[in-house]
Image: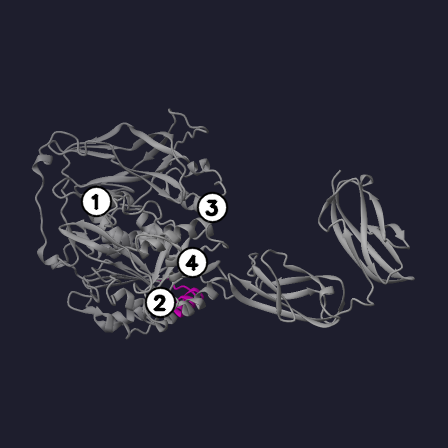
Amino acid sequence: MKGKKISTLILAALLGLSIPAVFSTTDSFSVDYHFSAQLQGTQWMIKDTIIQEIPGEPLMPYYPAQILLPQDAVLKDISVKTGPPVIQEGVDITWGQPPVTFSNTDTLHQVGRNELVYNSDTWYPDTLYTVVSEESFRGFTMLNVMLYPLQYKPKTGTVKFYERLTVTVNIGKGKKNSLYRGLPGDRDAVAQMVDNPDMTATYAEPAEAQPFLQGGPYPYVIITSSTLAPAFQELLEHKIDYIRTKLVDVSWIYSNYTGYDNPEKIRNFIIDAYNDWDTTYCLLGGDISAVPYRGFWVSTGGYTDSDMAADMYFGCLDGTFDADGDHIYGEPNDGVDWLEEVFIGRAPVETVAEAEIFVDKVIAYELADKPKVCQFHAAIIAAGNNPDSRQIPWDCEQWVPEEYTIKELFEQEDPITKAIWRTAWDGSYDGEPHTPPLTFQHAGHGNATCYGISSSVTWCNGDVSSLTNTFWPIHMSVACLSGQFEVNDCLAETYVKDDCGAIACMLNDNYGWYSTMDASKYSGEFLETMFRGLFSDGKQHLGELLNQAKSYWVSAAQSNSTYRWCYYEINLLGDPETPCLTKRRLLPPPTVTITNPPDGSIVSRTVKVTVGLMMGSSEARPRIDTVEFYIDNALVYTDEEMPFAYEWDTTQYADGEHVITVKGYYCGVFRDDDSVTVRVDNTTRPYVEITNPVDGSTVSGVVLVITETAAVDTVKFYINGVLVYVCQGEPFEFKWDTTAYPDGLYEIRAEGYQGNLLVAKDTITVSVRN
């Protein structure tokens, strides 16, 4: 494909593991890494590595290893052994340039090479590895290491390439992580992230803990205000057909949680929801007036932002982001957590009307067929298109499957007008298929309310309402400031809140960054891993997709302030749980039906009211979790466990007609009800009820089978359908010697007679165990 770079992304690790069953002070394990390389011009390109660009110093590749430590282990140290190196002489590796913002292309600052480095006769870098950090994700501890399979001696132009590096990790006994919950989904997610997925086998089931939050599980939580709650209730009622959902009023959080400020209270609640409700997705339902944001401090390239909106604060649950306690969050020494245990998205709405549009779009999107079209864009970002801005979409395109149609809108090749931009959104641009795209990538300059679709044409908030697309793409961009939702209103917000526009935006809160040597460096790399996460890694839920895209840059963000800036500033404006590759099937509503007693029947004594469920689909997951039982419109019992039933003592009610009503709920949402009318007759109606043993109990030895009766003169007792005893006078009971029967389940049936007429019966099941 034209303009393509050799892939500079991640993962070529092969493993050789030795996992100790019990820790000792000498425990260790090893992971093997194999690399392949190619010389492209004057640059060594090693598959699956990232180019480290330090101004004035040689451009060197590194591999960001993510190594899972055993459960409860702590790192002591690591060592790296190499295989025989490949040596090449006479190589001239060029040097890096300072990062540049997409808003500062008129004053590009080039630097010369660092002569101290280039006149050195020592290897660069002078190490094979750098330990970056230990990082936790859902209680699993990962070691982040930068591996250098290439070393360079600038003075002689000698390159030493290692095809194999073996990392040996020495560990000791550590402490349990309070965020470990042992869910299979957590284990699977970690296995996809690390270079040694087999190590997940060392993580055992967690100990039981007393929850603070009752109910659940609720994998999806919506946090919103009381004003916006009615609109988001509609979203909840849609979501519960696919995932258990809970809506939480932010004022309840403020009243029940402590914290330095409201953002900390919300985060503390999400920690509890994660642990007690198994929450995986959280939608912040409202703009900052309804659900506040947390601002991070970050500085790079001569720019500082002390209040960068970073919703990752609410989803990355280890630590506090304020280790030094100065209430300036996200500083390099603040113990930043980089991976979201709970995937966060925001609905940036201020009014009920805006919330209703957002909700309607999400519901329609999830039930829609997904187009196999991806729209890519590049405006000219610097004079002479140098560096070539098309490199940004080209790097993204390499991850798009062959069955998808790629459409390109490049200023370098054709003029771009607002009219053309509209056709790109509605799908009529650039031939068949004429369908709006699944994804829409933008590359150009920007500010909070506009971005450049060409070097001379800007697209602004007021233009969004002219869009007519009938499907809503996922929109991502490298533009500066267009995702700055803490201002009113940024371009990303406008796209998401418009009834056309985008289903979600992942845009920058502040400046986007690139390199004068490569337009796709920094911000563009995050866009590339969005496409990798979606199409290669299969992370189709929007919140999980953004977290996956960022996860490739954890080591880079901890060691390079420009990557840190880019990592912080990308937020998801959209629903984090929404799947973007598959269509959800519209499910018929579940129903509840009273299966006993029948409508119009005569009842007496104690009657077991039973309920049958119809799920409305072939799926196994029930969509009724609570049934309320009413007698004559008065609530008498609530059952929260299947099978739903109620023992109704009719003797507490007058003889005559009574109405039994049941109401079924799911996640607190009413789903269906049913009613029957019966006649209570406790005066003359014959009945038989087995009162001992209890239905479902375990019995042994000789058991006295006891009945309560009315208006019968004979009771016949059956075991598994075989008549074993006839009693013709009160008390109607018999002694059953269970030792004459093999262990197992048995049905006891008692039949009451008036003369030779069967008038009543009762059946129970017991387990014999002698």
Range of residues picked out in magenta: 358-373
Q: Depth check: 430 or 500 in front?
A: 500
Mark 2 nearby-residue class (10 Å; few <14, some 14–19, many ≥20): many
Determine if the magenta segment contains residue 161.
Answer: no
Does residue 411 sit above or below 513 in this rendering?
Answer: below
Whichever of callouts 3 and 4 sits on the residue coming sooner in the sequence is 3
The quarter of the picture where residue 555 lies is: top left
Name the amino acid, label 3.
Leu
Q: Disc 4 to disc 1, how far (Cα)?
A: 34 Å
Look at 20% across and 49% down and name the residue there: 562
Name the amino acid, label 2.
Trp
Q: Which residue is mark 1?
A: 560
Q: Left or right of 166: which side holds 151?
A: left
Name the amino acid, label 4.
Val
Does residue 499 sit above or below 613 in this rendering?
Answer: below
Please state which of the two labelled residues, at mark 2 or mark 4, is closer to the viewer.
4
Residue 118 at x, y percent in the picture = 10, 35
